Amino acid sequence: MFSMSSSLRALIFDLDGVITDTAEFHFLAWRRLAEEEGIPFTREDNEALRGVSRRESLNRMLKGRAIDEATAQAWMERKNSYYLAYLETITPEHRLPGVMRLLDAARLAGMRLGIASASKNARRVLDKLGLLEAFDAIGDGYSVVNPKPAPDLFVWVAGRLAVSPQQAVVFEDAEAGIEAARSGGFWTVGIGAATRGLAHLHYDSMAEVSLEAVTRQLAAG
Ligand code: B16
Ligand code: MG
């Protein structure tokens, strides 16, 4: 019989909403663009952008409004320039509670650690958090062609970590991320409200996660 406890070899983390909370900065940047262009955009609307690519975020912000490709590119660049300014304010203090405890426990247990983020700014964010060297592999918005909910990014990171999907647990805060990881055959831990009922295990926040509990509960099925 498959034994999770003896087979779990890697933890793979989404970035925004799991390691840190950049969703607020994405919101402020999209809202500024939307206001400049006369498009209504609320905090609630922003929830639909959680974990999806920059391009898909723009599509969702537009809510069916048509713009040409050159305008789309210019708007994404403008939004990103606003977002980059917010990223300058990130420090190691912005690591979410519980993250370092989990990373340290996993290292002690000899596990490999990876990042699988849809963001093209993932390395910059990790650098500002002081975590660029904390992971054995970093998959970001440049790593694969098909974004989440396709499983490609998680499979790419698992390959870099030299583990199979069945040997890895994915931590995700977004529906698209859980769907991606599950369709790739990974174990999943959902973090926060958007993933409730979708993942193998669920916690309201990273502060509640313990490696021992995750390992034990996944092994128990
Ligand atoms: P960028 P994650 C995602 O990060 C964000 O949750 C999502 O809101 C954003 O649109 C996406 O990255 C792309 O980000 O514009 O920086 O390339 O949750 O996958 O770590
Ligand atoms: Mg996320």
Image: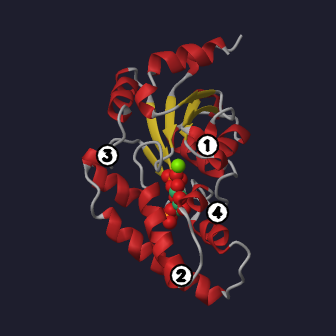
Mark before the other along the chain sequence, 4 or 1: 4
Specify the amino acid type for callout 1.
Ala
Q: Residue at x 44, y 33 (%)?
A: 206
> 167 left or right of 80?
right
Q: Quadrant of the rendered structure where residue 218 is?
A: top right
Q: Position of residue 169 (x, y in %)?
A: 56, 31
The dot on residue 133 is 3
Do residues under tags 2 and 1 come within 8 Å of each other at their CB atoms? Answer: no
- Hey, what amino acid is under mark 4? Val
Question: At x 65% / y 51%, what residue is drawn?
Answer: 152
Q: Residues within 10 Å of mark 2 (few under 14, many from 20)?
A: some
Point out the tag, 2 or 3, that comes first from the N-terminus. Answer: 2
Residue depth check, mark 2 versus mark 3: number of the one nearer the observer: 2
Which residue was labeled with disc 1? 194
| Amino acid on which disc 3 is placed | Glu
| Distance Cα–Cα, label 4 vs label 1 | 25 Å
Between the C-alphas of marks 1 and 3, the distance is: 29 Å
**Residue at figure coordinates x 51%, y 26% from the top left:** 9
Q: Which amino acid, mark 2?
A: Trp
Under circle 2, the secondary element is helix
Q: Quadrant of the N terminus?
A: top right
Crowd band around label 1 with a 10 angstrom C-alpha radius: few (<14), some (14–19), many (20+):
some
Query: What residue is shown with label 4?
Result: 145
- The answer to whether 172 is drawn above or below residue 152 in the figure is above
Q: Residue at x 40, y 76 (%)?
A: 81
Measured Cα–Cα span from mark 3 to mark 4: 25 Å
Mark 4: give few (<14), some (14-19) or many (20+) Cα within 10 Å: few
Q: Which dot marks residue 75?
A: 2
